[in-house]
Amino acid sequence: KKFKIITIDGPASSGKTTVAKMIAQKFKVPLLESGALYRFVTYLLIKSEKSIQTYMENEDLLINFLKEAFQKVKIELTSEGTFIYWNGKLIKDELRKEEVENMVSQVSANKKVREFLTEIMRKLGKEDSLITEGRDMGSFVFPYADIKIFLTANEEIRAQRRLKEKMGKVIYKDKNLYEKVFNNIKFRDKLDSQREVAPLIIPEGAYIIDTSNLTPEEVLNEILKIIK
Ligand code: C5P
């Protein structure tokens, strides 16, 4: 293998997952989608009896909750992506729900949540080669990665991409939905960039690619050049 770890970071809908999956498939290495883990924890907290606020204000309660919940969790990394099983059931579409999307940045700003998931991710990164994408993968979780990429794109384009992903096609006419998606992206970017623990930043030594006017294939080619 040409590398041990490649990290791809960037704001919401900058194209990280799409291109990370292409690289993972090309080199047949597992893909760690770190956002899925933060979404999963948010999903668990929403489902639980107590309010998220209660957990955020009580570290011991939160840690015990996470430890217990993760005894029933299996994380499978493949070159198709990251699969999270809870009590033997694949949790996937649930992670894309609006209620999760609206809470995930608050939950992932929590220091204990980050410590907990960072430890899990570093263990996952120990053995094999790995492609990983998220917000702090190059800056914090895997600072010793061989190659660090930072993807950006302008906000309108990112909102349109997210809308397309949600609907299967771009519906420009539905102004409300577009605005909702646009605002959610802005809101998450702001919280992700401004939090104290492992915020979204450009990692030291990262290659920056603006994907606003690039197709996924063009982004892939840029990254392949870097790998070479
Ligand atoms: O990448 P994705 O949109 O699935 O990430 C969902 C959320 O998870 C982000 O908005 C961010 O709040 C959080 N996240 C994070 N650190 C990462 C990956 C995701 O805080 N490394």
Image (cartoon, rainbow, N blue to C red):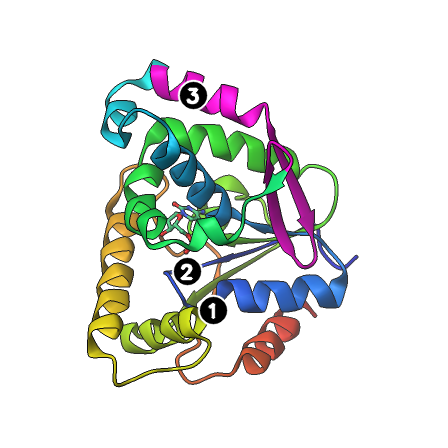
Q: Is residue 134 visible?
A: no
How far is disc 3 from disc 1 in space, using C-alphas? Answer: 32 Å
Labels 2, 1: front one: 1
Per the image, the residue denoted by label 3 is 65
Q: Which residue is mark 2?
A: 10
Secondary structure under the numbered disc 2 in the rendered image: loop
Closer to the chain start, of discs 2 and 1, is: 2
Cβ at disc 1 under 8 Å from ligand 1: no
Q: Which residue is more in the foreground, 130 or 225?
A: 130
- Say which quarter of the image contains residue 91: top right
Is residue 65 part of the magenta span, yes or no? yes
User: Residue 163: in sight, yes or no?
Assistant: yes
Q: Position of residue 161 (x, y in %)?
A: 40, 75
Residue 31 lies, with reference to residue 65, above or below; the image says below
Q: Residue at x 52, y 44 (%)?
A: 143
User: Quarter of the image containing the N terminus?
Assistant: bottom right
Measured in 3D between alpha carbons, the distance from the residue under mark 3 to the one under mark 2, in whole angstroms, is 29 Å
Q: Is residue 128 left or right of residue 181?
A: right
The spot of residue 207 in percent (x, y) is: 49, 65
- The residue located at (37%, 41%) in the rendering is 198
Q: Quadrant of the C terminus?
A: bottom right
Mark 2–mark 1 CB contact (< 8 Å): yes
How far apart are labels 2 and 1 at the CA level?
A: 8 Å
Ligand 1 lies under 8 Å from the Cβ of mark 3: no
Q: Amino acid at mark 2?
A: Gly
The magenta segment:
61-88
| Contact? badges 3 and 1 (CB < 8 Å) | no
How packed mark 1 is, by other alpha carbons closer than 10 Å (few <14, some 14-19, many 20 or more), is many
Type of amino acid under label 3: Phe
In the foreground, 11 or 35: 35
Task: In the rendered structure, find residue 15 and report the number of the disc placed on it.
Answer: 1
| Disc number for residue 142 | none
